[in-house]
Amino acid sequence: MLDRIRACIPALPPAEQRVARLLLADPRSFATLPVGKLAERAQVSKPTVVRFCRSIGYDGLADFKLKLAGSVNQGVPFVHRAVDEDDKAGDIAVKVVDNAVAALLRYRNAAAGQAIERAITALARAGRDGRRIEFYGVGNSGIVAQDAQHRFFRLGVRSAAVSDGHVQVMSATLLEPGDCAVIISSSGRSKDLMDVADIARRKGATVIAVTASGSALALAVQGPQQVLLAADHPEDADRYSPMVSRLLHLVIIDILTTGVALRLGSTALQPMLAEMKKNLRLRRYVAAAGSGGPGGSSSSTP
């Protein structure tokens, strides 16, 4: 949480930067002092302290203090356990699972509810109005974009996943106000994705970036029609293929999908999903009665 705030400082107004520096100098005191005392120490007005909390994605001072207290006092102990060349299979399993669980719990404690709310609102509005929702990513993030498109199209909304750089530029050029561009990037430094964010922003679309805070992409999405969903992780991509970032991104997509589904309402979704499930069931292999082969199970899971 503190790392994310430190990374956001350059994008904040000067007065809010003073609040951020006061916080970083003594997080424990910041979590307990009243707003008047905080404003006095930072030499700003009381509303500026509240605006600072909202600028970095929280509902207000009370919500921010609650998350901050949990982070600096209790929190979740996070230790990145690197995989070593002499690790046994059991050690590898423990380290990989521990890293994934710790990163997910860390994200749960630091997730900015206001940013998630803004993203869900924009996506639900686009889905309800029949607007386009485009998911952009390259490499591992391109796979996450495909998964996101699969989840959203099942909700009956117009969605597409694009991983080719040239096609991404063409796709972003066709965006219009009311459309959403969801840009997924582990590093936040891909030039292709930075170009897509710039084009989508100029076309008036809502830009939602799922990336590391402090990255070039994160700093580029600070406007009113832009939402940053920060996913930070201590991943060493030089030693092994990125894993934790992909899991974090998939969880964020799950959060967005669930939120959008709830906003769209069960009245329209349930009949469509029931029909989809019925048609999928007809595509299954059915074995002879009493057979132990494929299809013998009565499970309704696709």
Image: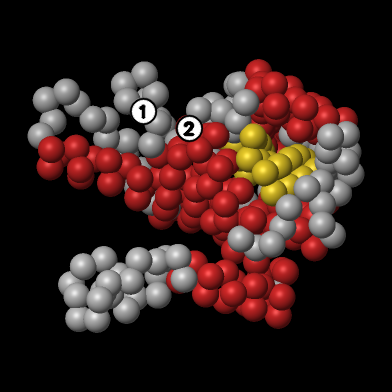
Dot 2 amino acid type? Asn
Q: Earlier in the sequence, mark 1 or mark 2?
A: 2
For this rendering, which residue is in front, 97 or 77?
A: 97
Residue at the (71%, 69%) spot, across then down: 263
Up/down of 269 relative to 182, above or below: below
* Apparent side of residue 240 relative to residue 63 in the rendered image (left or right): left
Instruction: Report whether residue 13 is seen.
Output: no
Q: Position of residue 167 (x, y in %)?
A: 70, 27
Residue furthest to the front in view is 288
Few, some or many residues within 10 Å of mark 1 (<14, 14–19, 20+) = few
* Apparent side of residue 173 relative to residue 189 in the rendered image (left or right): right
Q: Quadrant of the C terminus?
A: bottom left
* Apparent side of residue 168 relative to residue 225 in the rendered image (left or right): left
Q: Quadrant of the N terminus?
A: top right
Instruction: Report whether residue 296 is seen.
Output: yes
Q: What's the CA distance linking mark 1 and mark 2?
A: 9 Å
Residue at the (59%, 74%) spot, across then down: 275
Q: Position of residue 116 (x, y in %)?
A: 66, 54
Disc 1 element: loop
Dot 1 amino acid type? Ser
Residue at the (65%, 22%) spot, across then down: 165
Disc 2 element: helix
**Rendered image coloring scheme:** secondary structure
Callout 1–callout 2 Cβ contact below 8 Å: yes
For disc 2, the marked residue is 140
For disc 1, the marked residue is 241
